[in-house]
Amino acid sequence: MAEETAFDPKKFKEAVEEKTNARLKMWLEICAHCGLCADTCHFYLANDKDPKMIPAVKGKRVLEAFKKKDKIDEEFLEDFYWTVYGDCTMCRRCTMFCPFGIDIATITSTGRGLCVSQGKVPENLVKTIESYYKHGNQMEVSEEDWIDTLQWMEEELQEELPGATIPIDKKGANLLYTVNAREPKFYPMDISQAAMVFYLAGEDWTMSSKGWDDTNLAMFAGDLKAASYISQLVRDAAEELEVKRVAITE
Amino acid sequence: MRALQFEAPVWLGRDHNFEVVHSVTLFAEYLREGRIKLDKSVFANERCTYQDPCNVSRNGGCGKDAREIIKYLCEDFVEMEPHGDYNFCCGGGGGAIPMAGAFRERRLRSGKVKAEQIRATGASICITPCHNCYDQIRDLNKEYELGIKVLSFKEMFEEALIVPEELKAKDEDEDEE
């Protein structure tokens, strides 16, 4: 993504224009600054009630960006970047208390999308997105390692439950079980534990050799093009295997 | 879950021709239908609390299913206040876990609210069905010296599931005799 990291006000303006819509415009203009959202935010409470952390104030940063368009400078962008990625987890708790139901999470996500236009995305998130494109999962797990892990977990499980299996690519199964790529990477036992539950429940289930990572860090990065691509991987796997349900890991 | 269940049909221009279900809902179904059974005595000496992941409870609608599982699993369960749809984010959401460097410090600081919530329950186990919450609360456990165990439902099931005798591996020594 190196060529995209340059500061580019024109691209910023294009991103603003692309992301402007009636709902967002209304939210940004309707806020009455009543302050009810302040105490709902864990960032505000954990940072000695720093006014910068009030959800409405963070939302206002995005409004400023929308007004500035190509008049942004690098200092503004830097501060904006830390606000949208570092000071909001898009948990949507504030929206539960907002009299107008303003969705700060969507506003933050839009703000992150503006940063994407500048190639300004936290380094490790960029790495995961590259990994989704290259390996189909966020943790650079190759198909070979994935299958090996499933077989290894099956063997482990069979020591306790000789009849238990971890089916792979079983067409027409009722349930496709998908996981977080952190599982094959750091927590493989999660997979055998799930298999144990499915075995004892008598579930007709399968795992997929492709499109098995149900995380979508591109959504959190604000990169909706990549986010769509990632969900397509899982959807393709589910449709290919003709399953009725897709289960998401814990 | 949020991505695949709610956002993807819009991104990809049509509804899925399959149902998306979170493990929490699935496990609650299995227990409700009697397809799996848990031995509640296994965690009888532990006080448990539950971390509602934002994208599973508030934004996913699975809070009630989680409580149903807990009824089959825990003798001593204490809710955090607030909880369910009004629960605080642990600080690890929205992609915060993989963001490294200066983001890590912000993440741990923002988790102070969650750490205090957990401490107030007096729980020895914090259950959470989300890898982001799981990793964040494990970090908070160290940072704020909570002295708890962080577990997923699956990890607890592994201990508590009742396995019919005929499905268990036979002791090899016994076979030889």
Image: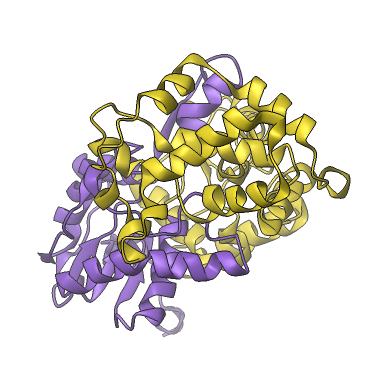
Chain colours: A yellow, B purple
The structure residue drawn at horizontal position 69% and vertical position 32%, both measured from the top left corner, is: A229
Above or below, B132 relative to A58 = below
Total numbered labels: 0
Residue B69 visible, this orientation = yes
Above or below, A70 relative to B67 = above
- Position of residue B138 in the picture relative to residue B28 (left or right): right
Above or below, A102 relative to A136 = above
Q: Position of residue A8 (x, y in %)?
A: 80, 38
The structure residue drawn at horizontal position 66% and vertical position 29%, both measured from the top left corner, is: A69
- Position of residue A68 in the picture relative to residue A49 (left or right): right
Viewer-closest of A139 and A88: A88
Q: Position of residue A104 (x, y in %)?
A: 41, 37
Viewer-closest of B8 and B115: B115
Viewer-closest of A15 and B53: A15
Q: Which of the 4 quarters of the picture holds residue A112?
A: top right
- Position of residue A61 in the picture relative to residue B171 (left or right): right
Viewer-closest of B15 and A175: B15
Q: Which of the 4 quarters of the picture holds residue B21?
A: top left
Q: Position of residue A187 (x, y in %)?
A: 53, 66
The structure residue drawn at horizontal position 61% and vertical position 44%, both measured from the top left corner, is: A221
Q: Position of residue B141 (x, y in %)?
A: 36, 77
Above or below, A171 relative to B122 = above
Q: Which of the 4 quarters of the picture holds residue A11?
A: top right
Residue A243 visible, this orientation = no
Point out the residue furthest to the right here: A3
